Amino acid sequence: MMSKIAVFPGSFDPITSGHVDLVRRALPLFDKIIVAIGVNSQKQTLFPLEQRMSWIKAVFEEEPNVEVDWFENLTAHYCTRIGARYLLRGLRNASDFDYEKTISQLNHIVGGGLETIFLISDPAYSHISSTIVREIIKGGGDASPFLPAAVMP
Ligand code: ADP
């Protein structure tokens, strides 16, 4: 039996409680979920790759079916390379949908049938984004209500 591997791609700058909830809810659907940080050298991030990776590792330390990785270039090519046939993405609202729809259709072609599985965000987390968290941190505020306990920026 081929194992069902899903890649959850993103910047995770930093990982939020919304991301964590999504992964936990998707665990029963897959044999393995790889939280994979897409690295784009043109894009400035608030936290370095090593820091973002170690936070994700800490969050899922006790979850044997979750792995952490990073990749460059196309998400679809990364999936092919590691033998993942599924992408995991979250939908918070209509603008997430508009954006994700196109990306998903492109990945299906480029990834030779790669399927994106969407979970609608839990209402308790649908207001949370890494962008908002970064703004709070930059402004000197306390972002802990939006972050898993292992993430202490
Ligand atoms: P990107 O670099 O694509 O913006 P993010 O790290 O912001 O990556 O998000 C990665 C994925 O996590 C996206 O599918 C996004 O919809 C989902 N996501 C982000 N925040 C939440 C949340 N609060 N609830 C559910 N899904 C979320």
Image: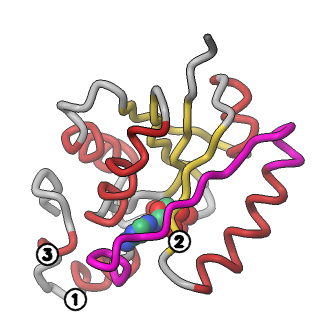
Residue 139 got which mark?
A: 1
* Range covered by the magenta-colored residues: 108-127
At 31% across and 84% down in the image, what residue appears? 135
Ligand 1 within 8 angstroms of badge 2 C-beta: yes
The secondary element bearing badge 3 is classed as helix
The secondary element bearing badge 2 is classed as strand
* Kind of residue at disc 1: Gly
Q: Position of residue 100 (x, y in %)?
A: 67, 69
Total number of numbered labels? 3
Of circles 2 and 1, the one toward us is 2
* Kind of residue at disc 2: Leu
Residue 91 got which mark?
A: 2
The secondary element bearing badge 1 is classed as loop
Q: CA distance from mark 2 to mark 1?
A: 27 Å
Q: Position of residue 13 (x, y in %)?
A: 38, 62
In the picture of the structure, the residue carrying the numbered disc 3 is 145
Whether pointer 3 and pointer 1 mark residues with C-beta atoms closer than 8 Å, the reply is no
At 13% across and 75% down in the image, what residue appears? 145
At 55% across and 40% down in the image, what residue appears? 7
